[in-house]
Structures are given as structure tokens and as C-alpha cells.
Image: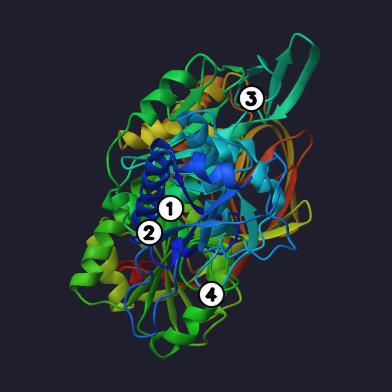
Amino acid sequence: MAQLIRMQDYISRYEQDIYRYPTQFARLKKQQWDKLKAAYNAGELDRLYSEHTESETQVKFDPPQEDSKRLFKKVKGIFLRTGKQESGAEELPMPNRIEDPNVFSLRFPFRPASLDELKQNFLNQLLRFQMKWGSSKLREKSFVDQSFFLDERLRFFLQRFPDTFLVLYKPIFLLKNAPVEVEVILLTPVDAWCVTFLEAEEDAAFIGSSERFWVRRHHKHPDKKVLNPLLGANRMTNIVSRLFELYGVNMPIKKVILSRNGYVDYPEAPYDITILDKRTFPEWFERMRAISSPLKAQQLKGAQALNIAKLHPACDLNGKRSITKRMEISMPHLKETVYFIVNPMAGNGESLKVWKKAEKILQSKAVPHEVFFTREKGHALRMTKEILSGTKQDTRMIAVGGDGTINEMINGAIGFPHAIIGSLAAGSGNDYVRGIQKTESVEEALSLFQDNAFSAIDIGQFETNGKMGYFVNSLGMGIDAEISDEADRSPLKKWFNFIRAGKLIYLFIFIKKIVTYKPGCMELIIDGDRHFLKKVWFIVIANQSYFGGGMKISPMSKLDDGRLNVIAVHDIPLLKLLTVFITVLWGGHLNIKNVDSFSGKKIKMKNEGSVKIQSDGEIVGRNEVAAVVLKEKLRVMLQADNRYKNMK
């Protein structure tokens, strides 16, 4: 019988001591079953039933003495007799009935005809007790929703798996200061399973795809759209993996779509997903039930990490106290502390390797620091604002990720003049580090951060489709934005990052796009001067030299001149466009006809058709955008020679 260590956001004694209660519950269950089985075999149950219509077994969990270090005394079992008459139906615990969650009461409304029947009755009532016991503490208890006592899926996990399996059923985590419920997390002694159910009528078939909706088919009903279960499965897996990473849990995480009564057809399913339907579920189920391994240290450590992160007004997904609370503790040292915001998804996980390396160096040199991990797009921006709003002293903020992560941090830092921004490159493009910070290794970057070497640089501000934001690298409209968008969503990006050739994804997508992309007409306004351009492939407003993963799009850009440079590629045939994308690697494209270069303080671009707009590689709008330079608006960390070269 698997153990319920957490259910939704109910309190749980397992969060107090995960290393004690799982073994204690397993021991309790075995002792009581052995005692009950012996009574049955000895004929004592028959004698009891001959005298009364109901027998009741109670197991009391006695609270400890105040000076005792143990949580419980020795479990004692006694048989009590009662003259209360009950019907044959199983009784559910009612809200108005006072029940001690530390007492296991076993009632027999009917005489068991066999040992198997006795065992099933024992398990059914132990299930009730477990839900009460697992959702309470010694001096606190939860009023559990009655629907959970009849929940078939919960019963399936608790009654059909071994005692050493730990279950988190519909746990609630805090995301963006809002509660988010996931489905089932099953911790076995060897791995963690994130389970998402996909069940309907018997023999229903689900047609999978990468789209937002799947199709459910059944011979008795018309086709129906169902939400792609991978959306919830991916979110659940991300939560578990980030918590495991944060708390150092070394345990494989497996993602599963479970359809016990139907079929799932998804030939191109992602490699990291396990699909269990009527064809594959029985074998998997028997294999899981056959696991006889005892509770393991990493399993309990993982359970502790997930329980620490339960929903609490002062807790967040990373399981620590909220940023605001930490500020109260760290305020005296803010001037010395370096804050790191890590995007664990950047570079196909490369960011976590970079951070581990950086963390070892920081610890060896006793550099005071704090680290936060992002969960989704926009999270780095929000955390940056929250950290900076807690102090007025100079604060070093370091993004560990790619250009998207540093862009979010910069957008969050605007309005806080005490912010000093830096980056540890761990993405696909890394144009910010290449063109602005100009550090080539983790060691070099950390040395720069500790030296507090910084200067104020210009940045760009844009407005498009009613949305305002900031960019530090470039703002573009045309095929460059299309390439950035598709590269970001392409599954090949992970593969290119894996072989440490992340920037080649942009070249790959470019070759693919030039065949289908249709250049259109654009209006370009620079400080009031209008330019009407035909067959425009792209226009880039550059604040620094590089974009697109190392292309030297604007060699003449400076970080302190109070101007933005504009590169427009238009009216050129396809073959010449290929020449542009080759020569741009060293900045030679500016010698090609109809590759025009401008500069100005206020720029506006407008397209006649429908085309995307990118800001530092992130899609921000369509068709029309206005930009303005903000002179020396942001303080960033720079190499000394780079400061002297670029800053006057």
C-alpha cells in the first residue's frame, strides 16, 4: 500500500519528518495485519462475531511526552467490543463526526468469508485512516473533502503499489504568486514518475500531436478535442526537476501519460515521454509492483524537497522563503552580495552546468551571493524588480542564460539606478556577452563581477502594438524576426545546443526561410526623415555590433554615442542575400549594394503586410514599431579595455 505524503495543500505530518513516518506507517500496517490475520486463523473473529454484529480494532498513536525526543510511543493494538449496530455498507467519515486521525479504527460490518476478503476490508479501511493520518499532524488535522474518500485514482495508487512508494496526489505549488495544482507524483525507491491521466470511455482512442489540442475518438461518440496532456505533464516535470536541482536530489524523473482503459496513438511522441495505454500499462504495472527495494535516501530527500515547496503564503516554488523575506535578512550585506538569476532551460540545460561551475568558484573565494531559478518567461524580469525594490544600494545582478534571460533582467532593472547588470553566457546566441561584456569564460566573468568594473551604456526603448519594452542588443523586423521565432521553437535547437553549436540553428533556419519568405515594402522614419523601401528582407536597429548568434550586423555601433544604428537589406535577389549572410559574419555586408546603413535617435518602422518584430531575439509584436535611444541609461559590467574603448 503506497503512502500518501501530500494531498493538495492539506497539512501533512510527512513534512515534519519524512525520514521517520514512512517507515513507521509501513511497520504499523504490517503489525496490525499480522495481528488480524492471526486472530482470523485462530478463530477469534468468529467468536467475536458470534457475540456482536461489529468488531472494532483500534490502534492509538500516542502523542509524545513534552521531554521526549520520539514522536510516538510504541504502537499498541487492543480489541474492543461495541454493541452499536451498523448496516452492511461501508461508512464514510462524516464532517460532524469527531475522529482522531492518530487512531486507526477497523470496523467489520459483515463477516469476511475468506482471508482475501478480510484483507480487502482491512485495506479499504486502512485507506480511510491513511488519508486522515497523512493530512494531519499530532495537534492539527485537516477536514478532508469527502470526494477524496471515493476517488478511484487515489485508491488505485494507494492500494495497488508497494509500501515503499510515496504519493503526492494533486499537490499545489506556488507559481507567479498563484496556486497551481498538478496531477500525481509517484516516488519509487529508484525514480520519480510525473503522472498525467488521459482517460474517458472504455476503449477511447486519443490521437496525439504537438498542437494545443488532441482528438478523442470513440465508436459511439463523435470526435472531440481534448487539451494536450503534455502541457500539464511538462509543467509538472519542470517543477519537480527544478526542485530536485535546487535541493541536490539525484533521482531520475520520468514523465508518463496514463490511459488505463483506452489507447493513445502518437507516433512522433517526444523521446522523454512514456505513454501507457491498454497495450502497455499491464506490463508496466506488474513491473512496478514487483519492485521490492526498501526506501532509499534519495527518494526521501526528493519527498522532502517536494514537501518543503508546499503552498504557503511566504513560500515560492524554489522552496525558500519569499524574496521579500530574504531581503529583510540580507539587507545589511546587499552591497557585497551578488545576485544570480539562472534560467535552467537555457542552452538545453547548459546554464545549470555553468552555474555549478560558478558556484564552486564563489564558494571557494567566499563571495557572498544568492541564487534564484526562473520557471517561465517573464520570471527573471519579476524577480529582478523584486530584488532591486528592496534596497537603494548598488546591487550586482547576474543573468545565467542566453540573450532572452539578460533581456528580461534589463527590462526589470529599468527604473532602478542602483542596478549593475552582468551575464554568464549559457544560451544559444550569447550576443550580449560577445558584443558588450566581452568575457570568454566563467572565471573571467566572475573576476569582472567581483572587481565591480562597470560603466553606463545606452539602451533602446520600443513601443509596438500598445506594448513598451527595452532592448540592449537589437530590434528587428523581417526575416530576422521570423528566424529568431522559429529557432526558439524548433526542437533542433536542443540538438544544436547539445553538440555545442547553438548558433548554427540560426543558419539552418535561415536556409529554410529564404525559400518561403516574401519580402515586402516598409516605411522607415529616422529622426523625421522618411525612407520608402521595397522588397525589404529585414531592418535591424542595433545598439551594439552583434546579433543572431555572432553576426556582426553593425560594426560601427558604439555603446555611449547616444544613437542607434539601422541596417536595412532590400531590393536584392536571393543569391545576393546569401552573400549578405556570409559577409555579415565579419561585417563585410555593408559593402554590398542595397545594404543601407543609417543612424539616429528616434526610429520608426512600418510594414505594409504582416511581419514579426523581435527584441533581443524575443518576439514582441507585428508590423509597426517605434524606437528611441536612452543615453547611458543602464550600468553594466564591462572589461576595462572595453570601457575605455566604448565609453568615450
Label 4 sits on what residue type? Arg
The residue singled out by tag 1 in the image is 242
Label 1 sits on what residue type? Arg
Q: Work out whether residue 223 or residue 131 is closer to the camera in this orientation and state it.
A: 131
Please name which of the two marks, 4 or 3, marks the residue nearer to the observer: 4
Packing grade of label 4 (10 A; few <14, some 14-19, many >=20) is few
Label 2 sits on what residue type? Leu
Pointer 1 and pointer 2: residues touching (CB < 8 Å)? yes
Dot 2 falls on a residue whose secondary structure is helix
Dot 3 falls on a residue whose secondary structure is loop
Which callout, 1 or 4, points at the residue further toward the start of the chain?
4
Q: Distance between the residues labelled 4 and 3?
A: 67 Å
Q: In which quarter of the image is residue 121?
A: top right
Q: Horizontal and vertical percent for residue 288?
A: 38, 30
Which callout, 3 or 1, points at the residue further toward the start of the chain?
1
Q: Horizontal and vertical percent for residue 284?
A: 42, 23
Q: Distance between the residues labelled 2 and 4?
A: 31 Å
Residue plotted at (65% across, 47% down): 148
Residue plotted at (54% across, 80% down): 417
The circle on residue 139 is 4
Rendered view: 73 above or below 29: below
Asked if residue 166 lies left or right of residue 109, the reply is left
The residue singled out by tag 2 in the image is 246
Label 3 sits on what residue type? Tyr
Q: Horizontal and vertical percent for residue 412?
A: 57, 67
Q: Work out whether residue 122 or residue 431 is closer to the camera in this orientation and state it.
A: 122
The residue singled out by tag 3 in the image is 517
The outermost residue toward the top is: 219
